[in-house]
Amino acid sequence: MADAFVLDYVRTPRGKGSSRGSLAGVRPLDLVVRLQRALVERTGLDPERVEDVIIGSASQVDDQGGNLARTATLLAGWGDHVPGGAVNRFCASGIDAVAQVSARIRAGELQLAVAGGVESVSRVPMFADRAPLWTDAEVIRQVGSVHMGIAADLNATLEGYTREQLDAYGVETQRKAAEAWERGAYAGSVVPVELPDGTLFDRDELVRPDTTAEGLAALPPAFAELGAQGQDAIALAAHPEAGRIEHLHTVGTSPSLADGAALLLLGDAAAAEAAGLRPRARVVACATAAVDPVLMLTAGQAAVERAIARAGLTPADIDVFEFAEAFAALCLTFRRDLDAGPDRLNPNGGTIAMGHAFGATGAIMVGGCVDELERREGRYGVAAVSGAAGLGVAVVLERVPA
């Protein structure tokens, strides 16, 4: 079996996922094309060598429909012969694309390929695909599907977390993100995007460095009204032991909606040598997991535990955990259960601070993990994302010394 390596990683800055966001005027297709061209510019890559391009996104309609990966590859000038495909595993779509391509390389089916994700929440809003899981009352009842925020508050209630604990995590991730940007932690991977007015957008715009515990304490619960409209009843029917749901998460302890894209160039050793590229990290193991769709957001941690075991490692062996911040409560549980302190868990901030561009987030987690392993000269890292309906994907990486 061949090894699969990360050869390069690029991402766009993340824009606010609304009509007021900096990337609202840029199509997701154009974000991917920009990154494909950046890979060529950075590495001297010959696109003729690329055997597939797999892109994840959570809402594959409108601007994100019609197999965006194939369209972007044609527009990027990579030639008619380079295939493209789309993946949807909800918020874990981008990391699932990385896992799938890595598996195909390890199996010998591919030698050199691109994997990543894109999401423009400002142009393709959440639930825009109007899937039965979101819109069909009978499906929702049978599955027990609830909004992610209700699942987060249910988890917080069952774990007994306080509002103060959640707010403290929200302040921490904002501080980390602001400090990481100031010291240039993202400079090597972020590719500026030219906006319609000709200006360059080059920085995650959701970071709030002035966040304080006092400021977060003043915010109202984000999901109490949604819960009162029937979502709490669905959650409590599945988990009556909660008694009642304490609505503790606010916009300050929830992932901010974002626009963005990320791509990773993956290949085996022979492809890396032929392209004149040095492998940066080896993909050691990948895992998917599924959990109770009402609790939902614990799936990312379950995938991490499975992937680490599959790699023959323990949590103590991991130098960096990049875990998508699907609400503060899940990060507190992850930190407790895997003994992942602030220095190892999202050391440069996470999606609460910098934004969650659904399909792109997982690819950003993997690439960010590689970057951080190199900075601290660590050996092993793990990236993971929880998604809707109780899905999770994790990837274990090993840094290749320079």
Image: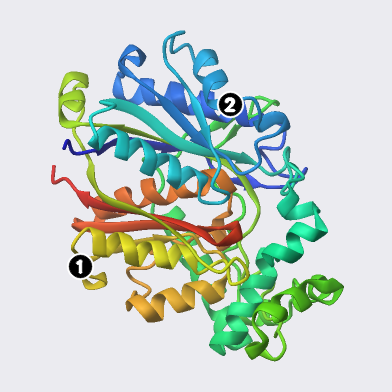
In this view, which residue lies farthest toward the right?
229
Asked whether residue 262 is in view, the answer is no
| Left or right relative to 133: residue 300 | left
Residue that numbered label 2 is attached to: 68
Position above or below: 167 against 311: below
Amino acid on which the number 1 mark rests in the picture: Asp
| Left or right relative to 227: residue 334 | left
Q: Residue 227: image x %, image y %?
A: 79, 74
- Mark 1 crowd level (few <14, some 14–19, many ≥20, 10 Å Cα): few
| Left or right relative to 299: residue 265 | left
The residue shown at (33%, 71%) is 343
| Left or right relative to 211: residue 6 | left
Residue that numbered label 1 is attached to: 317
Quadrant in which residue 359 is drawn: top right
Count all numbered tags in the image, as a single digit: 2
Q: Residue 305: image x %, image y %?
A: 34, 67
Q: Residue 116: image x %, image y %?
A: 45, 37
- Mark 2 crowd level (few <14, some 14–19, many ≥20, 10 Å Cα): many
Q: Which of the marked residues, 1 or 2, is nearer the chain's N terminus? A: 2
Give the quadrant of the N terminus. top left
Label 1's element?
helix
Amino acid on which the number 2 mark rests in the picture: Leu
